[in-house]
Amino acid sequence: MDIFDNHLAKPMLIGRDEGPFDSPDYLFELKVDGERSLAYVDGASTVLINRHGRHILPNFPELAGLHDRVDGKCILDGELVVGSGSKDDFEGIKSRWATKHPLAIQRLSREKPATYVAVDILYQDGRQVTDEPLDRRRERLLSVVHEGGRVAVSRAVNERGVDFFEIVKQQGMEGIIGKRRDSVYRMGKRTKDWVKIKHWLEDEFVVCGVVDNAKAAVVSLVLGQYRADGVLAYKGRVTLGRDRDEYRAIKRLPRAARNPFDVALPPGSAGATWVTPRLVARVGFMAWTTGNKLRQPFFVGLVPGAKAKAVVEHVPALV
């Protein structure tokens, strides 16, 4: 069965996370933060399908001419990005998905246009090429995609992952992906031949409350930072395992009489048990959202001896 005609291709998935490393067996690509999607192009038309099987051109009509920049009949794997594809720019993708009205979609396609960044090729001129090594597939990709307009090819370096990661980190990008140069493309499979190397942020937050569920193995900590006026600003929540010593320390905190925030909280925080804001938690996260909240947070640990009042709000440059 032809995967082009039936739109049956599935993107290969990253199998592990790791710290930066060097290896002659790997190439390292910039990891952009966008919408993973496969592009079916045949010289006359373009079909874009995301990893969940959704046709996405109705939300991104500016990419309907992608086939004009690609030679022949191909299936490309790529990332749909708004702006530079940085962690901050992911909010642009989210806003595009949330827009339903045709006139608003057209306006955003002009004001915040998306770009398709091709990273791999699965099919070329009637033949599936997924069994070829990555180096060969990348040669094919570079030969058929002509950058310009709303189309680009991912940037990559061979061997020197550590130096590349440092450059990416300094520029505030999400991270890099290491790929074995001899790896075949395993459609729909999660493989350790591809490695995600992310740049995470960390900051300190005051523990203000606990959202507890007796049936769950984890709880959710409600986090805040002090604004310049001395009032706690809500920053989001992070999960913590019940079996950790930090959870037991938080449970020993005296109860607070009320919610310490002066804004309406998301529904999931409504049932929180509020505690005296004494303990400070260090939390890692992917990025700040446009609402100045945490994206993809994870608990690092409590900060011994830290003063809660010293945990002040850091307003990101994007706000």
Image (cartoon, rainbow, N blue to C red):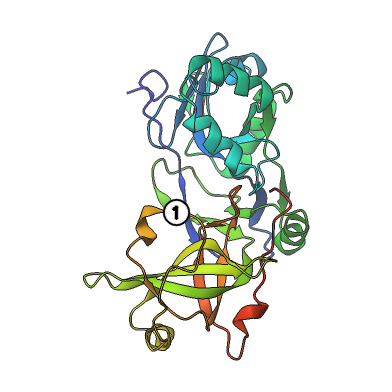
- Residue drawn at the location 33% of the way across and 83% of the way down: 243
SS state under label 1: strand
In the rendered image, the residue lying farthest to the left is: 215
Q: Residue at x 69, y 58 (%)?
A: 315
Quarter of the image where one finds residue 209: bottom left
| Residue at numbered disc 1 | 191
Residue 226 vertical position relative to residue 72 in the rendered view, above or below: below
The answer to whether any part of residue 168 appears in the image is: yes
Q: Is residue 206 above or below residue 36?
A: below
x then y, percent, for residue 41? 53, 18
Q: Where does the image place residue 94, in percent across and percent down from the top left?
A: 53, 38
Relative placement, left or right, of 192 versus 71 is left
In the image, what residue type sits under mark 1? Thr
Query: Which of the 4 quarters of the picture holds residue 65?
Result: top right
In the shown orientation, is residue 94 left or right of residue 175?
Answer: left
Residue nearest the observer in this picture, 24 or 53:
53
The residue depicted at 41 percent of the width and 40 percent of the height is: 187
Q: Nearer the viewer, residue 189 or 26?
A: 189
**Which picture quadrant has residue 116?**
top right
